[in-house]
Structures are given as structure tokens and as C-alpha cells.
Image: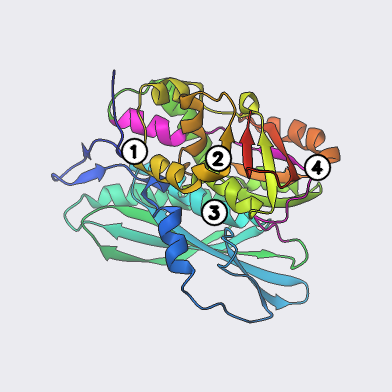
């Protein structure tokens, strides 16, 4: 049995400098660490700051006119795949996703680059090319950036978008009776970990890469046609960590385990304990709020698995859920209605 309970094995790539050490959103600080720090920062009282950091939302929103606000976010991380061009696409898609999770449209982006001086600059060129292509696909303009020398490669974007102040999707705001839709499959963190120890199939990695490089632009545009009450994108804190942020300890989500979309090979890899350390941090942070009803270990791990460029998790009016799902399925990625919101029960999340 293969066992990997860390972020993965190192993979070399030119000039004896390691390119892929295990990255993506598995590299994020744990939610408990971030909460400890952010709770100590002063809150800013400004009527034009419509969304700040206090609610764990995906991006900041600042009103600049009665009918216009800007959405700001940034995200960067080390590589989780060996191909630098694909890594650039994934990192950019992940950073752009926060704009879409808020319901906004991308306008400009700036590169964030950490790169070893001794590494082949052609590798950096491929990363930036992949990232720029995703910014262009988003309808945005790559307007510049900043780079520093570092021992390891890191890449991402600072992104600015626009939104109407009355049409913001916060990650809170769920209502009893709402259906929960997940627009991409889970399990990319587990699959990427398995790939780094040469245990992942080509089919599994292809599925993970397709999911991670697909912009949430298209799902966001569909959701805007319906009555959605809350939205977030599923990234480093895993499905359950981000769902916990949505519920705010004020509501309960009842999740149907068999309805959750995931990359099928991820189940087998989790069963073989090909796990991420970040997934275990996620479990430690939110497990106390969760009731598992006969849910096997492998599926639990998929639900805790940190996602890179994961899908949107949407709390939507039950009358709109089926029609929205039909449109989302046409995008070509596994997605589903996975549960519903209820009044607060003994546990915040119940998985059946």
C-alpha cells in the first residue's frame, strides 16, 4: 500500500533546482492560523468598503459610484504540476476565480512572480504565457506585475474586477430551504499528491487538470440568471472548510454524500492514504462542526481535500436549482445539487 501523508515528493526540473514540490492551494496557511491572526486586526469602518476581510469572503469590494464597485483579490502559490505552462494556467484560473465567486467581471490583472535566478528563464516564460492566456480568456488585460528572486517558484495574480453594488455574492447569506450546487468535482489535491509519487493514472490527472484550468467565469454567468443567496469558490480549505464559512454557525447544511461530484480515482487514492497535510489541517479545524452518518473514510478525505481552482459552491433558491444545474452540466464538468440548507441543528454540517 502506498502511503503519502505529506504534500508529496520533490521533482527536479533543470539546474538542480526543484520545480514541483507540492503546491497549489495545499500551500495555504491553515484556517485556524489565519483566523488567529485576522481576529487581531482592526476592522475598518468605511461605508464604501462593502466587503472586507471580516467575513472570510473571497475578495474585497469597494464602491466607487452608486452603480459601480471594484472587486479586488490576489492569489499565488508554488507549482502542483510539472508542466510550467499548465501551472501558469491553473494559478491564473485560481486567482481569477475569486472575482467570479463574488459575481463580478474581470478587468485587469498583475503578475506576482517568485523565481530562482539560476532556473531556466524559458520555464518562467511558459508560466507567464499560460497565465496570460487565462486572463485573456477571462476578458481581462494583463497590465504588469512584480517579480522577486526566491529559492522556489511561486506564481499568481492580483486581479481587479467590477460589479454592481446591489449584485454582490457574499459567502454568507444562505437561507433555509436553499439548495447547494457544486460546479466542479472534488479530489484534485489528492490526485496531484498521488501523481507526485507516481501513483496517479493519466486519466485522473487529465480530469484534475481540466477542472483546474477551467475558468469559473462560465458557471458564474449562469448563476447570475437565478436567485442565488450566497456563493464561494472551493479552494484550500476544502469543501467542508468553505461550507463552514458559508454557514456562519447560524444554519445547518445537510449534504447527500452520494450526490457529491468527485474525480473517481481520488476515492481509491484516499483509500490508499495518499493524502495532503493541508487536508488534515482542514479536518482538524472543522471536524467538530460535522456529523458523518456512515460516510466512509475515503469520501471524508475528499470532502476535506484542499482544492486548487475548485468550483463554485452556490446556495440557490430551490425553485431555480434544477434549471440552473441543467445549464451548468452543459459546461462539461461533473456538477450536482449536493444538499440543502436548514435551520441550525445540533451540528452545523450533516453528511448522510
Mark 4 Cα within 10 Å, few/some/many (few <14, many 20+)? some
First in sequence: mark 1 vs mark 3: 1
Residues under labels 3 and 2: Cα distance?
11 Å
Placement of 322 over or under 44, stated as above or below: above
Residue 248, x across and y down, in percent: 64, 55
Q: Which mark is residue 83?
A: 1
Return the disc, 3 or 2, that comes first in the chain's sequence.
3
User: Tag 1 or tag 4, which sits nearer the N-term?
Assistant: 1
- The residue segment tinted magenta is 168-196
Mark 4, residue position: 177
Q: Is residue 253 visible?
A: yes
Q: Earlier in the sequence, mark 3 or mark 4?
A: 3
Element on which disc 3 rests: helix
| Label 1 vs label 3, nearer the camera | 3
First of labels 1, 2 by sequence position:
1
| Residue 181 among magenta residues | yes
Compare residues 299 and 116 and report the one nearer the observer.
Answer: 299
Question: Which circle marks residue 96 in the picture?
Answer: 3
Callout 2 crowding tier (Cα within 10 Å): few <14, some 14–19, many ≥20: many
Query: Residue 323 magenta-drawn?
Result: no
Amino acid at each position: 500500500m502506498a502511503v503519502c501523508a505529506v504534500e508529496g515528493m520533490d521533482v527536479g526540473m533543470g539546474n538542480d533546482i526543484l520545480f514541483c514540490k507540492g503546491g497549489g492551494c495545499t500551500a495555504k496557511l491553515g484556517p485556524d492560523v489565519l483566523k488567529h491572526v485576522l481576529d487581531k486586526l482592526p476592522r475598518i469602518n468605511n461605508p464604501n468598503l462593502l466587503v472586507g476581510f471580516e467575513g472570510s469572503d473571497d475578495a474585497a469590494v469597494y464602491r466607487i459610484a452608486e452603480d459601480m464597485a471594484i472587486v479586488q483579490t490576489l492569489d499565488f502559490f508554488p507549482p502542483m504540476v510539472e508542466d510550467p505552462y499548465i501551472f501558469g494556467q491553473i494559478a491564473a484560473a485560481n486567482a481569477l476565480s475569486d472575482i467570479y465567486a463574488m459575481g463580478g467581471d474581470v478587468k485587469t490583472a498583475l503578475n506576482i512572480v517568485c523565481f530562482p535566478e539560476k532556473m531556466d528563464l524559458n520555464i518562467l516564460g511558459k508560466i507567464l504565457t499560460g497565465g496570460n492566456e487565462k486572463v485573456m480568456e477571462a476578458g481581462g488585460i494583463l497590465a504588469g506585475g512584480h517579480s522577486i528572486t526566491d529559492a522556489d517558484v511561486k506564481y499568481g495574480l492580483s486581479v481587479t474586477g467590477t460589479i454592481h453594488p446591489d449584485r454582490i455574492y457574499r459567502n454568507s447569506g444562505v437561507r433555509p430551504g436553499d439548495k447547494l450546487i457544486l460546479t466542479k468535482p472534488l479530489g484534485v489535491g489528492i490526485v496531484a499528491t498521488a501523481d507526485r509519487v507516481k501513483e496517479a493514472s493519466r486519466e485522473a490527472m487529465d480530469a484534475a487538470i481540466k477542472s483546474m484550468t477551467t475558468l469559473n467565469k462560465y458557471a458564474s454567468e449562469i448563476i447570475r440568471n437565478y436567485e442565488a443567496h450566497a456563493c464561494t469558490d472551493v479552494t484550500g480549505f476544502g469543501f467542508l472548510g468553505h461550507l463552514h464559512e458559508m454557514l456562519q454557525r447560524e444554519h445547518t447544511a445537510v449534504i447527500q454524500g452520494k450526490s457529491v461530484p468527485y474525480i473517481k480515482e481520488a476515492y481509491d487514492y484516499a483509500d490508499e492514504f495518499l493524502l495532503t497535510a493541508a487536508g488534515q489541517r482542514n479536518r482538524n479545524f472543522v471536524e467538530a462542526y460535522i456529523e458523518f452518518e456512515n460516510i466512509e473514510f475515503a469520501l471524508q478525505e475528499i470532502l476535506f481535500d484542499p482544492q486548487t481552482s475548485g468550483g463554485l459552491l452556490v446556495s440557490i433558491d430551490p425553485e431555480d436549482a434544477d434549471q440552473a444545474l441543467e445549464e451548468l452540466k452543459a459546461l462539461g464538468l461533473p456538477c450536482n445539487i449536493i444538499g440543502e440548507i436548514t435551520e441550525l441543528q445540533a451540528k452545523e454540517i450533516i453528511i448522510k
